[in-house]
Amino acid sequence: MVKKGLFFKMLATYTIIISISLIIIASFLSYWFQNYFFQERKQQFLDKSYIIQGLAIKYTTGDATSEEVNNMITVIAEYIKSDIWLTDSYGYVYAVSNKEHKEFMGKQVFANELAQLRIGHTFEITGPYAGIFDKTVRVFGTPIRNNAGVFKGSIILYNSIEELSASLKRVYEIIWISAVFAILFSCIVIYYFSQKIIIKPLAEINYVARKISNGDVDKRVYLKSNDEIGELAQTFNNMADAVEKNEKNRRDFISNVSHEIRSPITSIKGFISGILDGVIPKEKEKYYLSIAYEEIQRLTRLVNDLLDMSAIEAGEFSLKIKEVDINEIIRLTVIKNETKIKAKKVSVDVCFDKENLIVAGDKDRLVQVITNLLDNAIKYVNEGGKIKISSKVKGRKAYISVFNNGPRIDEDDLLHIWDRFYKADKARTIKDSTGLGLSIVRNIITQLQEDIWVENKDNGVTFIFTLMKVK
């Protein structure tokens, strides 16, 4: 339906354009032929007018008879294929070349044009002339003067437009026959090129689009074209690549979420089942319940992170931008994580250029950023290692860095550390990590329209992000 509909729309459009063009051309040619035809006859008439004028002057002086005058203008009229009348100085007709016009003999014609003729001017009239011609005519009049310059009458050249149209009828037939052949030829050309250039490529794109919509996301459009259709195919393939990538991300996301949720649930189920079945001794119940509690805490963190990630991707992660002291947030975050820090025997250095550093940001979300970065540093720092958190000002920007002297991040891992659920530890031995912390951090910093990046140092890894300094 789309294919036929598009073809017939194109065919109808081009047919209308060609038809209108040919009508305009035919109208122009008709007007041009009429003018050319009349100008040619007028020129032939002017070339012979001196003969008619000489004979007319002889007639007025009695040196030529009426029959001689009529015979002469009849011969000239047949030569130039027009009708000729002769009038005296008062506009009365005394000679006609066409016997059918003898009824005008002795009648006054073109009285209004006499004044123009008397002063030596010619006149031209096109259209019906009331009282003389009921049909459309083309008339040209020129004065007759004797050697002394006295006005003695006029010569009238007369052509019927209807007769002229009849003469041009064959020309019009040729034009319209050519138009029909042009339209038929155009239809064939339009059909061929529309099929090759537009219809078939669009049909292929449509076919691939249906396949992708049915889940076959690896399909692509293969078109070799440098025009807009080729550009559309390339754009479509880019879209298909994005769809395939999103589909892969969706599957990976479901797989990761399933793994992350199943692992703590399995542990909790095993411990509680062991306690209920009496497999675990009474004196060990508290120990295993504490492990189950830690798994529940892990599951809670995962759910909270998933909710945050969902809100971010849905555009519902709103920020309340205020003036906040980032140094105070860093101090409080370090204090809240003191238990984890002591458990790993890590030394934490906090270095500030100023006691207070006021920046623009959402306090709760900045707490989340610092917490996640510090939590990440504690996880990967060597036991008994060192963590350094610093803030400094450069121009209108505040630079916050979190350093740990743990192992460097592989170059391959650097490309993916911001991805959801990505962990450099492929064996997933770090149970405290949900794999969402750094992704959430980057999204928060991005929403603040700031930058965050990671640098491998000789002795460790540093995460750095910027904030807008207010004071």
Image: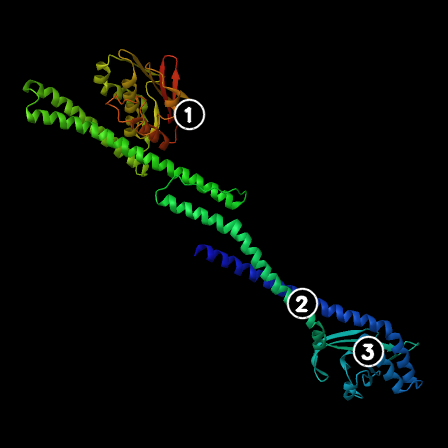
The residue drawn where x is 24% and y is 16% is 341
Q: How crowded is the residue under tag 3: few (<14 C-alpha within 10 Å), some, or many (20+)?
A: few
Q: Is residue 440 in sight in this rendering?
A: yes
Is 405 situated left or right of 141 in this image?
A: left
| Residue appearing at x 44%, y 55% in the figure | 2
Rendering quarter of residue 208: top left
Q: Secondary structure at mark 1?
A: loop
Q: Position of residue 154 (x, y in %)?
A: 83, 79
Report which residue position mark 2 lands on: 174
Distance Cα–Cα, label 1 vs label 3: 100 Å
**Displayed quadrant of residue 381:** top left
Which circle, 1 or 2, is nearer the viewer? 2
Tell me the quadrant of the picture where the N terminus can be found. bottom left
Residue sitting nearer the eye, 301 or 119:
301
The C terminus, quarter of image: top left
Along the viewing direction, whichever of 326 and 405 lies nearer the viewer: 405
Q: Quadrant of residue 430?
A: top left
Residue denoted by label 3: 78
Say which amino acid is labelled 1.
Arg
The colour scheme used here is: rainbow
Q: Is residue 40 above or below residue 297?
A: below
The picture places residue 344, in percent across and down from the top left corner, at 24, 14
Disc on the earlier residue, 1 or 2: 2
Of callouts 2 and 3, the N-terminal one: 3
- Disc 2 packing (10 Å; few <14; some 14–19; many ≥20): few
Q: Earlier in the sequence, mark 1 or mark 3?
A: 3
Asked whether, in this view, residue 175 is left or right of residue 296, the answer is: right
* Residue 184 in the image, given as x and y percentages of width and height: 58, 61
Mark 1 highlights which residue?
396
Distance from the alpha carbon under mark 2 to that under mark 3: 27 Å
Q: Please name whichever residue, 229 or 457, is drawn nearer the observer in this view of the structure.
A: 229
Mark 2: secondary structure: helix
